[in-house]
């Protein structure tokens, strides 16, 4: 068999499969937590991820994306269902049995500020997993960390520094270096760019793509931002209230969204893409805000982004006015007159 055929075959091999995953959290409320309430975070979620591909997961806040990401890694235990990783059912493995598979599965968190221990040096953050799994002798840790940092575009001289000395984008690079340290096959990236400045987001997405190509990584990529997911994913799952309501190749989903929620998310895309084409880089802000705008719960975030983010406030006034007007139009198109007026007022304030 030729090498090319073998490669495409291995590309199609399923690396992760989940069947009927459900997660019910028990939340204690009331005096001394006597009242118990159940929160259904996931209900009957099934899908697979092939080796070397990126599966995107989108959905509004609270739809169960992070729970899904954590359950597939068994950082959170499923209430029901099955997780098969590389042909092995890992659902009921003990911690000890699991550790040999776990090092092949890693996570990159949303918030690079809270996910890095401020009291640990960069070297120790990056190699913590290697020590836990005894994957490298102590004497080699510094070199190993330096190699991982080089992979994410950071210099060896950051080894002895602390997270607080770095910007958001650099911290996320450190978080990615930590995920890479054990040479994983599979990475859950849980909104890896949403806490970052718009101008930095593309750099981190590009880095993740380069790493995927270099090391044959497989991603479950969680995001709010449909434009990011569409760009990076081979297939996309749309989640709503703990369920996958739509599942398709990202192009197919784009052309033909079926579920009302997906339709709502996608309704704003053509306008945004047209804006991007017309105005170039400046409109990245329009795009980011618009994506957020598509999700009602993120409206507050969207406003803040456009009013205060470093990327937005350095833009020329006319571009910011245009961004608000584009949002006003989107709000009007979706029948939200109150928000349309709000956006127009914000545009007028910049006259
Ligand atoms: N540890 C927990 N205990 C109780 N309920 C939880 C817990 N974690 C999540 N939930 C609930 O499960 C649901 C799904 O939460 P999850 O964090 O997975 O959503 P999400 O899609 O990642 O949201 P976001 O976009 O805000 O990150 C929510 O209703 C949430 O309140
Ligand atoms: Mg989340």
Image: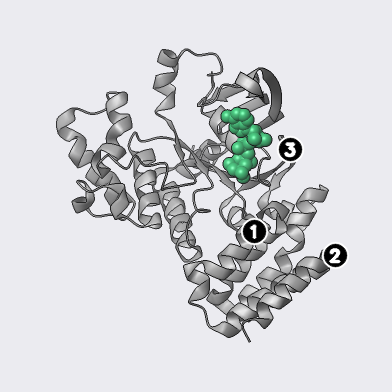
Say above or below: 274 vs 121.
Answer: below
Work out whether mark 3 precedes mark 1 in sequence or the reverse, and give the earlier one.
Answer: 3
Q: Earlier in the sequence, mark 2 or mark 3?
A: 3
Observer-nearest residue: 218 or 270? 270
List x then y, in percent, for residue 61: 65, 45
The answer to which of 252 and 182 lies nearer the viewer is 182
The secondary element bearing badge 1 is classed as helix
Q: Image height check: is 318 above or below 66?
A: below
**Residue found at the far bottom of this picture:** 351
The local crowd at label 2, few if under 14, some if 14 to 19, many if 20 or more residues have their Cα within 10 Å, is few
Return the disc, 1 or 2, that comes first in the chain's sequence.
1
> How far is the residue under mark 1 from the one under mark 2?
18 Å
Quadrant of the image where one finds ligand 1: top right
Residue nearer the viewer, 234 or 135: 135
Label 1 sits on residue: 300
Picture residue at 63% right of the left edge, 64% below the top:
303
């Amino acid at each position: 068999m030729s090498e090319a055929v073998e490669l495409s075959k291995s590309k199609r091999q399923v690396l992760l499969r989940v069947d009927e995953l459900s997660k019910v959290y028990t939340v204690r409320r009331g005096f001394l937590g006597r009242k118990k309430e159940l929160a259904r975070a996931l209900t009957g979620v099934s899908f697979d991820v092939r080796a070397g591909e990126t599966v995107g997961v989108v959905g509004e806040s609270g739809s169960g994306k992070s729970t899904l990401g954590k359950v597939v890694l068994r950082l959170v235990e499923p209430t029901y269902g099955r997780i098969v990783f590389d042909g092995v059912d890992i659902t009921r493995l003990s911690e000890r049995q699991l550790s040999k598979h776990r090092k092949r599965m890693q996570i990159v968190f949303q918030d690079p500020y809270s996910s890095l221990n401020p009291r640990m040096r960069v070297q120790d953050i990056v190699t913590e997993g290697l020590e836990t799994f005894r994957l490298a002798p102590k004497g080699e840790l510094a070199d190993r960390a330096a190699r991982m940092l080089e992979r994410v575009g950071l210099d060896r001289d950051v080894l002895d520094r602390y997270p607080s000395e770095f910007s958001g984008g650099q911290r996320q690079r450190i978080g990615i270096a930590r995920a890479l340290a054990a040479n994983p096959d599979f990475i859950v990236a849980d909104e890896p760019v949403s806490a970052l400045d718009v101008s930095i987001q593309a750099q981190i997405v590009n880095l993740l793509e380069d790493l995927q190509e270099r090391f044959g990584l497989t991603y479950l990529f969680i995001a709010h931002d449909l434009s990011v997911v569409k760009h990076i994913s081979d297939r996309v799952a749309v989640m709503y209230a703990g369920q996958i309501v739509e599942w398709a190749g990202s192009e197919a989903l784009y052309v033909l969204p079926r579920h009302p929620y997906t339709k709502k998310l996608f309704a704003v895309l053509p306008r945004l893409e047209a804006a991007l084409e017309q105005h170039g880089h400046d409109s990245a802000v329009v795009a980011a805000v618009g994506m957020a705008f598509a999700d009602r719960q993120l409206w507050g975030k969207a406003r803040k982004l456009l009013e205060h983010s470093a990327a937005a406030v350095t833009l020329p006034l006319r571009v910011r006015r245009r961004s608000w007007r584009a949002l006003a139009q989107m709000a009007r198109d979706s029948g939200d007159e109150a928000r349309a007026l709000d956006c127009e007022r914000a545009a007028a304030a910049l006259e």
